[in-house]
């Protein structure tokens, strides 16, 4: 509330500037930042999805190449020439079969550039090498593992082999035992089909847009394929990613990590039917550069909108606020008695019309002061008397309401509250000319009356009003309780210097409304109620109105006949609805 009051005291230009910042500039800035962050996230998500798409393509290329090699090994199992070579112990026959096999192998070596070499070896010690001329290489580790599989395909990890000239190549090899077709428990020999790792990597390599690096790893985290041959055959250097791949157990893995203060995302997917995994590394900073144009556009938009907003602010100030300030300054001159004040009217809008009417008002005031003021002074007293004689409650109520709002506008809060309470009393007492009123409004009227009395008497007056909620909407005669309170204050405490207590209570008892007014004053000097009515106009008036409205079922009695204090009780039938015409016939006004 205090903040709103403080804001209401600001000048118009500061109010408009505050609202512009609060409702235009700050929301625009927040929205721009939100759009930028969302665009950044969307681009990064799209980049990761692109990586997954590239990895799937690479995965498919590699899987196709490996499947072709596995198909070659399957053909070799059923090739009569190859089985004959593995079973032959005669060198002449072996040479004959070698020539036939060599043609088959050369065809695949020339059509598949990533093929390094093919070796056939029987368990009698004969061996045939096709492709690269191999030197001394120890492949027993892989051969032993293949033998344990008894004819199933076995893919080795990446390892180095040397040709007969000592040159080293990185290869991965398919090993497979070839069994006798008539006795699958009898192994004839073994085929080894070696793939050049570097050439195989180039075959499966797609367009690596936004991808920092791509690896092919085994489940143990060792590098099988990579563009750098020096990394092949060694463990992948990032332990957390290698661990995540091992824990993934054949499922896709996505992991964020930071290295040298650069944020990366690692995406890994398995190659179906193998123990290999394709791993792609994305540099998030490089991805963020993809939205630099969006960022620049947002910045330009913010600058343009801010500039337009400031121009709108200046325009609004020049064409509206400045004219209102000029009008406000001129009104201060009139307030000081200077009737030469005048504003320049250059437009026909609302502010222009306001200025035009202000000029006419000032001219009219000047005319009244100069020509009619003296006459007004002479007739003032007579006109006031005439107005006082013509005043009516409705006019008084409306005037009080106008004064209350004026006091509130002038920040006279306490005065406004008092006028509002007095105005409310008049409204309730008027009641549109009707004699009936709800008990709730009657008690409100008396509460306001007592509040006014308490402001006059201070701590010397205390009061309590109690009402059973069931009788709040009961109809009663208006101004039935207030005369009793007034009697108590005027006559009940004349010779006493004590704190005055007044207690009012209302409740329902056997379909009868009971209203008690109790004080701690002197009480009544007589024990006879009839005598009290004769000497008290207020009691007599209330008694007469009750008898007229309700007949003998209503009454007013003295409950406490001895001092100190007085206790007056009003009793009449409880009703929440009435026929006002019937009451008017009875003479209740």
Image (spheres, grey):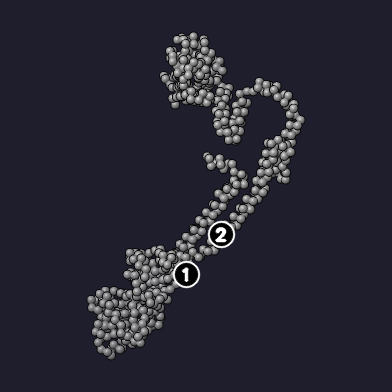
Q: Nearer the viewer, residue 143 or 295?
A: 295
Please indicate, yes or no, whether residue 228 appears anywhere in the rendered image.
Answer: yes
x 44%, y 70%: residue: 212
Whether 529 is drawn above or below 117: the answer is above
The percent coordinates of residue 78 (x first, y second) are 30, 79
Whether 268 is drawn above or below 179: the answer is above
Taking the image as shown, residue 7 lies to the left or right of residue 273, namely right
Please indicate, yes or no, whether residue 75 appears anywhere in the rendered image.
Answer: no
Where disc 1 sits, the SS reads loop
Q: Which residue is under mark 2? A: 299
x 48%, y 17%: residue: 496
Q: Are marks 2 and 1 in contact (CB under 8 Å)?
A: no
In front of the other: label 2 or label 1? 2
Dot 2 alpha-carbon crowd within 10 angstroms: few under 14, some 14 to 19, many 20 or more: some
x 24%, y 76%: residue: 184
Q: Which of 397 and 122 is in front in this view?
A: 397
Whether 431 is drawn above or below 83: the answer is above
Where disc 2 sits, the SS reads helix
**Disc number at residue 209?**
1
Picture quarter containing residue 192? bottom left
The percent coordinates of residue 577 (x first, y second) are 50, 23
Considering every residue shown, the one lying at the far bottom of the view is 92
x 25%, y 87%: residue: 89
Taking the image as shown, residue 258 lies to the left or right of residue 93, namely right
* Mark 2 / mark 1, whichever is N-terminal: 1
Q: Which of 448 and 231 is in front in this view?
A: 448
């Amino acid at each position: 509330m205090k903040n709103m009051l403080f804001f209401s005291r600001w000048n118009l230009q500061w109010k408009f500037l505050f609202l512009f910042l609060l409702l235009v500039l700050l929301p625009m800035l927040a929205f721009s930042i939100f759009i930028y962050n969302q665009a950044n996230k969307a681009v990064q998500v799209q980049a990761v999805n692109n990586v997954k798409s590239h990895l799937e393509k690479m995965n498919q290329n590699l899987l196709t190449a490996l499947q072709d090699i596995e198909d070659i090994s399957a053909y070799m199992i059923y090739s009569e020439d190859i089985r004959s070579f593995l079973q032959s112990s005669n060198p002449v026959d072996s040479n004959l079969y070698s020539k036939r096999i060599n043609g088959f192998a050369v065809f695949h070596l020339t059509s598949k550039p990533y093929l390094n070499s093919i070796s056939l070896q029987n368990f009698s010690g004969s061996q045939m090498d096709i492709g690269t001329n191999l030197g001394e290489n120890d492949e027993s580790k892989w051969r032993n593992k293949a033998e344990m599989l008894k004819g199933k395909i076995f893919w080795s990890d990446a390892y180095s082999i040397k040709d007969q000239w000592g040159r080293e190549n990185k290869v991965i090899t398919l090993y497979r035992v070839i069994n006798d077709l008539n006795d699958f428990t009898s192994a004839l020999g073994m085929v080894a089909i070696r793939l050049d790792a570097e050439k195989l990597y180039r075959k499966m390599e797609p367009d690596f847009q936004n991808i920092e690096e791509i690896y092919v790893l085994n489940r143990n985290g060792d590098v099988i394929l990579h563009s750098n041959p020096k990394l092949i055959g060694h463990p992948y250097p990032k332990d957390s990613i290698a661990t995540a791949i091992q824990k993934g157990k054949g499922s896709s893995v996505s992991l964020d990590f930071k290295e040298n203060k650069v944020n990366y995302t690692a995406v890994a997917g398995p190659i179906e039917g193998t123990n290999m995994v394709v791993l792609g590394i994305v540099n998030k900073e490089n991805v963020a550069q993809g939205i630099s144009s969006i960022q620049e556009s947002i910045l330009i938009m913010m600058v343009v909108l801010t500039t337009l907003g400031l121009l709108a602010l200046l325009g609004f100030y020049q064409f509206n606020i400045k004219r209102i300030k000029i009008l406000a300054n001129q009104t201060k001159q009139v307030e000081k008695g200077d009737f030469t004040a005048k504003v320049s009217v250059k437009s026909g809008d609302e502010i222009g019309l306001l200025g035009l009417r202000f000029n006419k008002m000032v001219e009219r005031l000047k005319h009244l002061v100069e020509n009619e003021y003296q006459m007004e002074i002479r007739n003032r007293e007579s006109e006031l008397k005439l107005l006082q004689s013509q005043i009516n409650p409705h006019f008084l109520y409306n005037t009080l309401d106008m004064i209350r709002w004026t006091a509130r506008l002038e920040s006279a809060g306490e005065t406004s509250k008092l006028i509002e309470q007095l105005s409310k009393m008049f409204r309730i007492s008027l009641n549109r000319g009707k004699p009936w009123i709800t008990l709730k409004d009657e008690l409100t009227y008396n509460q306001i009356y007592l509040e006014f009395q308490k402001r006059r008497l201070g701590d010397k007056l205390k009061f309590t009003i109690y009402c059973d909620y069931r009788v709040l909407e009961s109809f009663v005669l208006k101004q039935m309780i207030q005369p009793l309170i007034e009697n108590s204050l005027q006559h009940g405490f004349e010779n006493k210097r004590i704190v005055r207590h007044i207690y009012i209570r209302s409740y329902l008892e056997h379909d009868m409304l009971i209203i008690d007014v109790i004080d701690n004053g002197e009480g009544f000097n007589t024990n006879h109620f009839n005598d009290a009515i004769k000497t008290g106009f207020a009691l007599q008036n209330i008694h007469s109105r009750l008898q007229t409205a309700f007949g003998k079922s209503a009454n007013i009695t003295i409950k406490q006949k001895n001092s100190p204090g007085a206790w007056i009780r009003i009793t009449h039938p409880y009703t929440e609805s009435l026929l006002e015409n019937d009451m008017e016939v009875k003479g209740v006004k």
